[in-house]
Every structure is written in structure tokens, then in C-alpha cells.
Amino acid sequence: ETPNLAARLQGLAGPDEIVIALATRRLVGAAFELSDLGAHPLKGIAEPVRAWRVKAVHRTEGRFDAAHGGVALTPLVGREEEVALLLRRWQQARDGEGQVVLVSGEPGIGKSRLTQVLREQIAGEPYIALRYQCSPYHLNSALYPIIEHFEFAAGFAREDTAEQKLDKMEAVLAGSQEQRAESAPLIAALLSLPTARYAPLKLSPQKQKEKTLEALAGQVEALAGREPVLMVFED
């Protein structure tokens, strides 16, 4: 049945298009922008099949949000000790003593849910959230999560021009005016944006890498000078 359905759905797809049926639609959650094509009678399948065209990847802050977007979750049970540990570490960070917590375990045991519960618990407090989602498809790009976060935080849209993206990027940079001016060309280059509006960097690749890492660290430091910062890396 599955290959037959796939072949029939392929017949509904135009060049360079992906069409999915209900089972896949349920699995992808809010991870993609979809266009409802309605129900179609398909040869060899008794009932009409509802289909969707995949339009684009939907920008979310993490795979957990994409998978559960708009779905009411049941209460978290049996993780009181872990949640309490995270809250204690958060309080220490708020008091000025930075903390790092590693949550490790098999897929599906609720690691992402723990961080979500932490955010729910501290929702009434002033803080800045920085969330980074790693990807097995981008192993050759060590800073891929940083790039994705910048694009999400700046609100990049597919129809934006390079100049508009630069304006949006500059709007979310933190720190003093001098610090933002120094960081802008480095981060623009990291985001593969043209840097013609800035003075040439004139750096070797190794030096530019070092300066870029310094600029990224400086961004976090500048934010932490304003409010407590919660950084979450999803591996």
C-alpha cells in the first residue's frame, strides 16, 4: 500500500515539489509550511486521499516546538527532582554565578520537555532566552546553530533583499555602538551576507574566525549585562 500511495502522490506533485498524505502530515507537525490540496481519488486506493504540498521549512526555535506546535501537552510526571535541580541552577545564575547543566539520555525520554518546563517555571521573570538547534544534516558547519538562531531572531524572510537582511541583523545586535560596529561585518560574513557597506576586514581566514568567535561571545556577554540569559543547545 505504501509504495502505491507514494506513486499516486508523486502524480499530484509538479516539478521540484513534494506532496504528502495524512500520516506524514501528522508526523511533521509544524516543521514545514504546507498548502492543503484537498482530497483526491487515487487509482488503487478505495477512499479519496487528502494531500498537502510542502512549501518550505517553517522557522521555529527548535525541533520540539516544530513537532508539538499548537498541541496541548499532558503534565510532566516523575521529573520533579530534575526540574528542581534546573531551577536551583537558574537561581544561582540569576545571582551572578554562571551555571552549565548537561542533560543527556536516549531520544524520547523528555530532555527537550525538561527545558520547556524550566521556561514555563520562569516565565514570570525577566530574562533573555537564546535557543540553538543542532542538526545532523549540517555536521560540516560548526556554527550552523548560531547562524540559524541569528536568522530566526532577526526575522529573516525569504523575500528579503540582502540589504533588508543586513538592516534586520544590525537591529538585533547587542552591546555598545562601538561593539556593534565591530561585530556587524563579522556576523554579516558568518550569515553569508554581502559586507560592502562595511570597511574591508583585511583579515586572514584564521584571524577572521577568531574575531568572529570573539564577537559572538561578546554578544552573549552584552546581553547578560542587561538581564539573566538562558542558553539552550539542543544537540
Image (cartoon, rainbow, N blue to C red):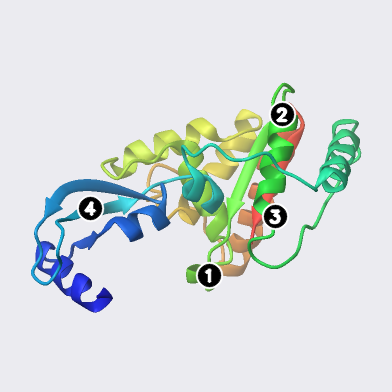
Residue annotated with mark 2 = 127
Q: Which residue is pictured at 55% across the width and 50% down the height?
A: 64
Q: Which residue is pictured at 42% across the width and 37% down the height?
A: 155
Query: Is 19 on the left-hand or right-hand side of 194?
Result: left
Q: Which residue is pictured at 61% across the width and 45% down the height?
A: 131
Disc 4 to disc 1, C-alpha distance = 26 Å
Q: Which badge, 1 or 3, is on the more N-terminal residue?
A: 3
Would you place residue 168 above or below residue 38 in this image?
A: above
Query: Is 19 on the left-hand or right-hand side of 96?
Result: left
Where disc 3 sits, the SS reads helix
Q: For mark 1, does the 10 Å Cα neighbourhood hold few (<14), some (14 to 19), or many (20 or more) residues? A: few
Where disc 4 sits, the SS reads strand
Disc 4 to disc 3, C-alpha distance = 31 Å
The kind of residue tagged 4 is Trp
Disc 1 to disc 3, C-alpha distance = 17 Å
For residue 52, the mark is 4
Q: Which badge, 2 or 3, is on the more N-terminal residue?
A: 3
Q: Position of residue 3 (x, y in %)?
A: 24, 78
Q: Which badge, 2 or 4, is on the more N-terminal residue?
A: 4
Q: For mark 3, does the 10 Å Cα neighbourhood hold few (<14), some (14 to 19), or many (20 or more) residues? A: some
Marks 4 and 1: which is nearer the front?
4
Q: Quadrant of residue 6?
A: bottom left
For residue 136, the mark is 1
Marks 1 and 3: which is nearer the front?
3
Marks 2 and 4: which is nearer the front?
4
For residue 111, the mark is 3
Q: For mark 4, does the 10 Å Cα neighbourhood hold few (<14), some (14 to 19), or many (20 or more) residues? A: many
Asked whether disc 2 touches disc 4, contact meaning CB atoms under 8 Å apart, the reply is no
